[in-house]
Amino acid sequence: MTTTTTPPKRPTRRLRWLLPALLLLVWLAIAGGGGPFAGKLSEVAQNGNSAFLPASAESTRADQLYAEFTSTNAVPAIVVAERESGITPDDLAFLAAESVGPPPIPSQDGQAAQLIVPIDAETDVGEVVEELRDRLASPPDGLTVHVTGPAGQIADLSAAFAGIDGMLLLVAGGVVLLILFVVYRSPILPFVVIISAVFALALASLAVYMLADAGAIALNGQSQGILFILVFGAATDYALLLVARYREELRAVEDKYEAMRTAWRSTLEPIAASAATVIAGVLCLLLSDLNSNRGLGPVAAIGIAASFVASMTFLPAALVLLGRSAFWPSRPKADPQADRGDLASAHRFWNSIAQKVGANPRPIWMVCSVVLVGFALLLPQFKASGVASSDLFLLRTDSSSGQEILGEHFDAGSGSPTVIVAREGTLEAVTSAARVEGVTTVTPVAGPDGAPTVVDGRIAVQATLSDPADSLEAEDTVERIRDAVHAVPEAEALVGGTTAVDLDTKDTATRDRTVIIPVVTAVVLLILTLLLRAIVAPVLLMITVIVSYAATLGVSSLLFNHVLDFPGADPVVPLFGFVFLVALGIDYNIFLMTRVREESARVGTREGTLRALTVTGGVITSAGVVLAATFSALAVIPLLFLGQLAFIVAFGVLLDALLVRSLLVPALTIDIGKRIWWPSKLASRDGADSGTGTRDPVPAVNG
């Protein structure tokens, strides 16, 4: 007689921990190989004008043609010196000896001198300028010397981004770690989450470096900084959601593997939808005509994708191997007999909030709406028509100080002329037309013999402006020049130069804002519709996020205009603010509403909303605080653009997490009732959903 025996389960058990262990080894290899590239991103980042030029603009075409008229591809650095008692011969001798360029030119009032030092654009312009500044660092007593002009501004911009990798990692990592200690009250779990974010950054840095080095994407300092912040914020947010569900399952089952399997499956859909929403939103920036904006799209998308992969592979593997020890000293104990619907005791604070929302849904959403709309009415005060290049820095820079001195004693546009390229035979007409208000001199580009240079049937003209080349007044002058020379018959005139580049960049950014914002709205709405399998709920969520965005810009206008006294904002600020706030802000609604849908399928929309708010309230609020804190870290870079973006995103995320998601959306959902799921089957589900917003007593959410 043959007997059969049950195969031992040892191999299966071994496989259960072997797979997580292998995942950890894979991620250790990724971190070891990709980690160093986070510090090397600056090597492939370009922060000069070429990194922000419009891909197709009049200034781009004009400068390309004008390059044929010059023997070198140079970026001018303007050395300007000032002595209130008057420039001395020793001062001029010092400037001539320490600078490589033509002799210095004294001002008419005799109190200043300037000289233009051409710097080869193919070199590291910032490094050359710093060497020049070092040579001029010890002027004669009483003489003030600055290096300004386009090259000086490039050097100051490069200095602002110097050390961005280490500084942002330190600030963002420190802030997130502190918040996680408060949230988890554990010495182990915060480090697991931080390591997950660091590994995600290593993977993202490796991918971005390789693509930027190959010339496939454009990387600059602002994209690099936003990449670090997005990875840390998104990876931590996804971790908070997974960890919360894992802890919930550990209280229900003894087996940690089973708990993780359930938690992973439950959070995969909302986290994947969240990541897809942000990726789709930032990839809409590929529609931009600005190199800097187009480059940010894939850079940010890579960062979000890396965060998703790390959060759904490395983090579950680490948590399942640690098991309940990860939560030490408050290890969750399994109690299979416990009522999993008893949420009141596990989430007392948010159960209390849910009761208040359930008892007074209509007054709550109406008050929240009034607050949001009130702030949104301030939106027209948000000034986003652009600022002068010298106002881009939050701190005083050498180039901005030099530009002020240059404007006081010289034609402020000298050294950075506006260039006009036109057809041969229209020189006199173009030269005459270019003498508009704000132009001091108009000079044809001539050869060694003094005759105007002709290249491929074209001539070139330089116009010196009376206002600083980086000022808004100079941009107005360039617009007048364009109107005048474009009217010259058969000239086919193109206007370029530093000021024209700034003008075209701002005009293109304004165009991008008009085009991209509706596209982002449509893409995010489509994702929400597919996720929730409804129409009413996605439209409602989009409206709340858009109103929240408008309210955020309204509050920002009060702060920027009347408290911080900012000169304005770049047109790209509201565009980036919209992309990040809509994509990131909708995350919290996704986290909430996917749980609402899950619960509504069992207990109806009203009770399902209260359950979802009770369970997700703490984790989503924590996620909002983490993301706001990480974006606030951008303010350590002393640039106006990043400082404004840091506040807009941080405040907007908090507004979404604390007001919109915690009160407005749940109250609206309860008041509308099951009709919010139209046209899905949930909209016709029989149950207690009345959608009347009546103030019936609401018991504690106990299932």
Image (cartoon, helix red, strand yellow):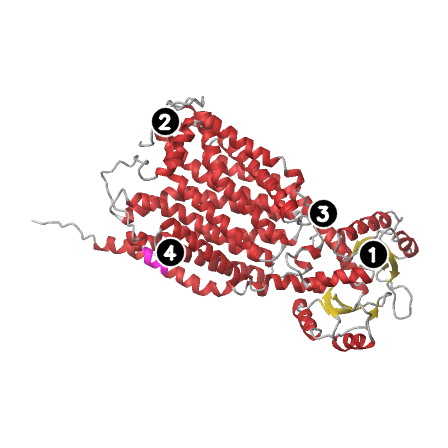
220 in relation to 147, above or below? above
Judge from the rendering whether residue 68 lies leftward or rightward of residue 320; answer left or right: right
Q: Which residue is mark 2?
A: 698
Q: Residues within 10 Å of mark 4 (few under 14, many from 20)?
A: some
Q: Nearer the viewer, residue 666 or 605?
A: 666
Mark 4, secondary structure of its residue? helix
Q: Is residue 236 visible?
A: yes
Please state which amino acid type lies under the numbered disc 1: Ser
Give the Cα distance between marks 4 and 3.
45 Å
Mark 1, secondary structure of its residue? loop
Front position among marks 4 and 1: 1
Q: Which residue is mark 4?
A: 192
Question: Main structural element of the magenta stretch: helix, strand or loop?
Answer: helix
Q: Which residue is mark 3?
A: 507
- Residue 158 image-quadrant placement: bottom right
Labels 4 & 3 near each other (Cβ < 8 A) = no
- Residue 638 image-quadrant placement: bottom right
Mark 2, secondary structure of its residue? loop
Q: Residues within 10 Å of mark 1 (few under 14, many from 20)?
A: many
Q: Which residue is mark 1?
A: 466
Give the Cα distance between marks 2 and 1.
71 Å
First-in-chain label (2 vs 3): 3
Coordinates of residue 495 in the picture (x, y in percent): 80, 54
Name of the residue lying farthest toward the front: 85
